Amino acid sequence: MAILELEHVSVSYDGQRHAVDDVSFSVEEGEIISLVGESGSGKSTLLHCMQGLLPKSAAARGKITLFGENMLELSEDRRRRMRGEQVAMIFQDTGRYMNPIARVGKQFTGYLKLHLDKSREELLELERQMLEKVHLYDVDRVLHSYPFELSGGMRQRVGIAIALSLHPRLLLADEPTSALDVTVQAQVVKELVQLCREECATIILVTHNMGVAAHISDKIGVMQNGKLVEWGSARDVIRHPQEAYTKSLLSAIVELDDEQFLCR
Amino acid sequence: MNQELLKLDQVSKTFRNDKGHAIQAVKEVSFRVMRGHSIGIVGESGCGKSTLARLITGLTPLDAGEILLEGNRICGLSGKAQRQVYRQIQMVFQDPYSAISPRMPVGTFLTEGLVHFGMISRKEAGKEAERLLQMVDLEPQLSQRLPHQLSGGQLQRVVIARAISIHPKLVILDEATSALDVSVQEQILELLVRLQKEYALTYLFIGHDLAVVRSITEEILVMKNGAIVEKLPAKTLVRDAREDYTKQLLSAVFSVREFQEP
Ligand SMILES: Nc1ncnc2c1ncn2[C@@H]1O[C@H](COP(=O)(O)OP(=O)(O)OP(=O)(O)O)[C@@H](O)[C@H]1O
Ligand SMILES: Nc1ncnc2c1ncn2[C@@H]1O[C@H](COP(=O)(O)OP(=O)(O)OP(=O)(O)O)[C@@H](O)[C@H]1O
Ligand SMILES: [Mg+2]
Ligand SMILES: [Mg+2]
């Protein structure tokens, strides 16, 4: 069953050019979709509008149906209620969406309290569990820290832990592992896949890491200039890319067995 | 060319919070970089890479040790002397949004330093901003925008362009290309290498993607828990890695190749 359907979605920030240009696709429950593509091609914009998070200045056209609701016409109130348990988002720049002057623990508890009717101790236990899942073991310190006291990758993992904590049915993840070294990245990616498999959650992942996209997704969409230029099973897109742009993406990848040294 | 540009000698930094927790973020780190060379720093999340970078740029005061730029101590300077020195060191931050004031148009941000140091006049700023944008493959019109009106990768490129525009001696790039898709990343890396040759720039390149870090540096330092645990030549990294962590880094890479070749 399709839980998410985009029909001719276009978004413009300035009334002229389209940051997202006539994009259509549908997503089945339990699928992992990766969106890859050029910087500035509209990937973050597309994720934001799926959850109704576009700035006021932006205009969206077309239709986005999520769990049977038309997201582009939904009231702010209904939309807010969908966030958390139904849809959760991991932002590309977690730091910018966190409150810089509140401790991580306070923000985490605040998020959980909106949705769960549990005691402080129970919430704290859940927070600990989630942080350990993303390999943050120094839990007490992390909860007691202000965002700026954490490293970039630690902040990013806090964002992931918060988003996963309510077991959302749809997870929108914008570059969730871009600041993580490969060892942690592998763990986090596993955690995402597990969520998906165990709870039949659906994941839409924006990533520039073609390796991650190839390894975990069922389908891959390639964006360029606001358009979805390629869409297909991960296998097909990686093995038989149709578009020149997809081919160039694949050929620009540097891997360790390459003898590529730019500096000499 | 064969001059030492930067030298760190037993540099340490400990953070303490109000509960008395102490985190030793950087532990007795020593290394040197020659002018015109590039050195890479890799290591797990939270191991102290960004802190080390902030110590070198003077943004965070160090607890112990010494940092020398061209043989001169640069820690603990103040006033004019400090500004003079830190003009020579530019940093591209891991989180580009934190580097730029949310209300400053991109064009102003790009040329502010150039105007301040008298390298161009205020009148020339507009043109120069457009030139810098083109240099990193962005449209000139973006110079009117505010930072949050750019995509993550676009802003990252703006920050890189500004850092190299004033031709500093040392550029510290903290995960500077991590937010970029591979094709733009490739362009930026090539641009960095070209500018390095042109202006004899020295890079300290912090990253988590070993393949990328290796492609633009000569030597790689592996950090763990605040300390440098291994120094490896970029060329023979795969063969020479001894430390467990380095080997893990090498093995955990998600390869696309294995998918392409059935
Ligand atoms: N608030 C805004 N106002 C005006 N233009 C915007 C705004 N946000 C984004 N844009 C523009 O819309 C286009 C798409 O941006 P978006 O952030 O969706 O790209 P992206 O694919 O996520 O890129 P990246 O990989 O660099 O994060 C870009 O050209 C960007 O400059
Ligand atoms: N201002 C601060 N106050 C307290 N602790 C800090 C501060 N800045 C950094 N730390 C701590 O120092 C350690 C090293 O952080 P740093 O940002 O240097 O890591 P990193 O190697 O850059 O990691 P990442 O790859 O995730 O960016 C972390 O445990 C972090 O929480
Ligand atoms: Mg984006
Ligand atoms: Mg860092």
Image (cartoon, grey):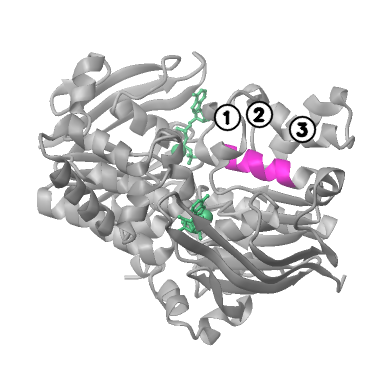
Q: Secondary structure at mark 3?
A: helix
**Residue ID at (13%, 35%):** A116
Is residue B168 toward the left or the right of residue A16 in the image? Answer: right
Mark with earlier residue (3, 1): 3
Is mark 2 in CB contact (under 8 Å) with mark 1? yes
Mark with earlier residue (2, 1): 2
Closer to us: B174 or B26: B26
Mark with earlier residue (3, 2): 2
* Coordinates of residue A28 in the picture (x, y in percent): 16, 40
Q: Secondary structure at mark 1?
A: helix
Is mark 3 in CB contact (under 8 Å) with mark 2? no
CA neighbours of label 2 inside 10 A, class few (<14), some (14 to 19), many (20+): many
Q: Is residue B218 visible?
A: no
Q: Amino acid at mark 2?
A: Val
Closer to us: A38 or A115: A115
Question: Where is residue B54, by image quadrant?
Answer: bottom right
Residue wearing tag 1: B147
Residue wearing tag 3: B111
Closer to us: A118 or A91: A118
Q: Which residues are magenta?
A: B154-163
Q: How many marks?
A: 3
Question: Where is residue A138, by image quadrant?
Answer: bottom left
Please, is residue A111 above or below residue B171 in the view? Answer: above
* Coordinates of residue A143 in the picture (x, y in percent): 33, 48
Q: Mark on residue B106?
A: 2
Q: Secondary structure at mark 2?
A: helix
